[in-house]
Amino acid sequence: MPASILPQNQDEKELFNAISSFFSRFKIGNLLRACNAQKEKGVPVTRIFKYKLCNVFTGRSMYMQQRTGSFRESFSKNTFYRFLNGTKTNWLKFTTLLSKAVADTIEPLTGSDRINAFVVDDSLFERTSCKKTELGSKVFDHASMRYTKGYRLMTLGWTDGNTFLPINSSLLASSKTSNLIGPQQHYDGRSLAGQRRKLAQMKGTSVMVELLKTALNAGYKADYVLYDSWFSNPAQLVEVKNLGLDSIAMIKKSSRIRYEYEGQMLSIKKIYGICKKRRGRSRYLLSVNVMVGKNQKIPAKIVCVRNKRNKKDWIAFICTNPDLSEEEIIRIYGKRWQIEVFFKTCKSYLNLVGECHSLSYDALTAHVAIVFARYMMLALEQRKDEDHRTLGEIFFFLTDELADITFGESLQIILKAMFEGIYTVFQVTEAQIDAFIDIFVDRLPDFIQNSLAKSAVLD
């Protein structure tokens, strides 16, 4: 354990034991060596990594620890930054292997019939200034519908409906030279540093496929891949299917995207308009089988759901497993919302955006990987602590029009807030995500909640 967080009280003793157990149980040192994070001499990388992992629980940054004289580590700040800036460490491989090891301990806790899924989404990784930050860009933020400075953090995760684990990620810069603000460092395309930067400037849909391939090569298995309308074009659905995975995604109401229905190529609006809708208080309005793709066609099922607040409005999902029932398509897609809670938790409690001010793309990549490791440790502690209703089940009940929705007092406000968000723009608001984070944090052991409170105050 780093000297800066040696246990002083009961909470810190329990935190000390949890972190030490996490390191030994998943052999973090061996994983780091397998990913080229090693030194020939001097301070072991495991000590530097552990300091970085644990520093979020101290309530003080490395800079403030040095200013106040509380920094008691055996390495200098130069050693620390050389570790982060290393170009040879394969952080994408590290988080993939670590999350697989954690998932292997969680998966046996549920029945063999439990639906596991990959979840893909991106989130804004904002930087106040990008002029000197490598590959800093003007990137489009889907939530605010405007351009801002920074990166898009494309993330692949895994969920069993209760526990979400981040698998791997890439900080996406702009592929357009006109949108690049920061400098570009040039590396041999065969090197790890070159491959990392090449991935950063690929299209988001292509990066998604590369992250899935990495997870599958590591031995991950999932029943479905869940993603929103930004990635659900027909070509993407076919490409994911070719990986041996089925997709469940929300559909864009675009007239340019067409599906083959009864021998005709029609947009989703056309299909919805010509088909007879289900009457009464059914769980869904419409279900049709279509063919997806241009050169290669695959079967799929489209399910449309009514907006209770606006009878004329509706949303549509597509599933490349046409044998799956409509209710299951809706229920399983609900598991996607866990990645929204993950992003907000990392930003609010684990210092994803505010902690690392490095100008190096390699250092930022290392920082993201370490934040992911922090979240995995929290997810494991939470799973050990208790097992409540899943977010996917909450979503499923929201779409149920046959019976009244009944939950405990702690969920009533969330349901009321989510109802408008899902059925109007189908994007959760900051307030709704905050409510889900409260559930996530409340399910953590007390000693971790108390430690995270320091981080939230610091941030």
Image (cartoon, rainbow, N blue to C red):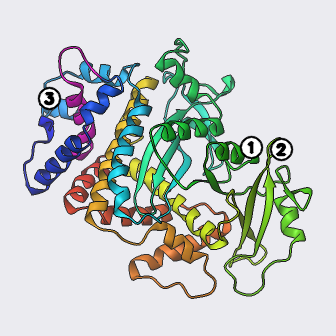
The residue that disc 2 covers is: 294
Name the residue nearer the viewer: 436 or 321: 321
Amino acid type, mark 1: Ala
SS class, disc 3: loop
Residue 108 occupies quadrant: bottom left
Mark 2 or 3 closer to N-term? 3
Mark 3 or 1 closer to N-term? 3
Residue 118 falls inside the magenta stretch: no
Crowding at dot 1, Cα within 10 Å, few <14 / some 14-19 / many 20+, comes out as some
Q: Where is residue 374 in the image (x, y as percent from the top left)?
A: 32, 45
Q: Give the range drawn in magenta.
A: 38-63
**CB-based contact (under 8 Å), mark 2 and mark 1:** yes
- Quadrant including the N terminus: top left
Q: Where is residue 113 in the image (x, y as percent from the top left)?
A: 47, 66
Quick check: can you spot residue 153?
no
Vertical relation: 54 (above or below) 46: below
Position of 361 compared to 387: left or right?
A: right
Position of 446 compared to 266: left or right?
A: left
**CB-based contact (under 8 Å), mark 3 and mark 1:** no
Residue under the image location 17 percent in, 16 percent down:
42
The residue that disc 1 covers is: 235
Furthest toward the left, the residue is: 8
Crowding at dot 2, Cα within 10 Å, few <14 / some 14-19 / many 20+, comes out as few
Q: Please tell me the numbered disc located at residue 73.
A: 3
Name the residue nearer the viewer: 216 or 185: 216
Residue under the image location 14 percent in, 56 percent down:
11
Vertical relation: 178 (above or below) 50: above
